[in-house]
Image (cartoon, helix red, strand yellow):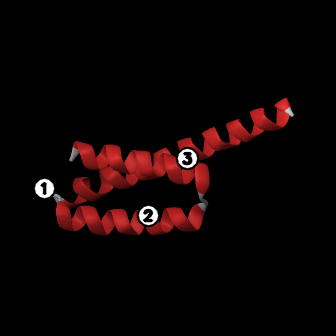
Amino acid sequence: MLWSVVTVVVVGIVLGFSFRVPTLLVATAVTILATGFLLDGPLLPRVLVPVLGLQCAYLAGLALAGLWRRIAAKGS
């Protein structure tokens, strides 16, 4: 379970850097399907924890990308 959350968080940060909301929706659907079928345990926590991790990591990646663009624009 831990590695699935770590993997989803890394994917969320990468999506935040590179892509926009439609890609996040597809990634959320894939995460729900994958965790629903592959992990053991109660359904709600096994799906909710990776999805929340993905969403929060996407926002963090989006914020870092905006900060990076602002610093790059200020430097040139």
Q: Is 65 on the left-hand or right-hand side of 59? A: right
Q: Is 14 on the left-hand or right-hand side of 17? A: left
Q: Mark 3 points at which residue?
A: 59
- Outermost residue to the right: 76
* Tag 1 and tag 2, C-beta contact below 8 Å: no
Q: Name the residue under label 1.
A: 41
Residue 27 tag number: 2
Whole-angstrom CA distance, mark 3 to mark 1, is 27 Å
Secondary element at image label 2 = helix
Q: Of the two numbered discs 3 and 2 on the same chain, state the one appearing first in sequence.
A: 2
With respect to residue 70, does 41 lie above or below? below
Q: In which quarter of the image is residue 42?
A: bottom left
Secondary element at image label 1 = loop
With respect to residue 58, does 64 lie above or below? above
Residue at the spot 69% in from the left edge and 42% down from the top edge: 66
Residue at the spot 28% in from the left edge and 58% down from the top edge: 47
Q: Of the two numbered discs 3 and 1 on the same chain, state the one appearing first in sequence.
A: 1
At label 1, the amino acid type is Gly
Viewer-closest of 69 and 58: 69
> Residue 21 placed where, x, y %?
58, 62
Whole-angstrom CA distance, mark 1 to mark 2, is 22 Å
Q: How crowded is mark 1: few (under 14 residues within 10 Å), some or many (20 or more)?
A: few
Viewer-closest of 9 and 43: 9
Residue at the spot 40% in from the left edge and 46% down from the top edge: 9
Whole-angstrom CA distance, mark 3 to mark 2, is 14 Å
Residue at the spot 65% in from the left edge and 43% down from the top edge: 65
> Residue 33 placed where, x, y %?
29, 69
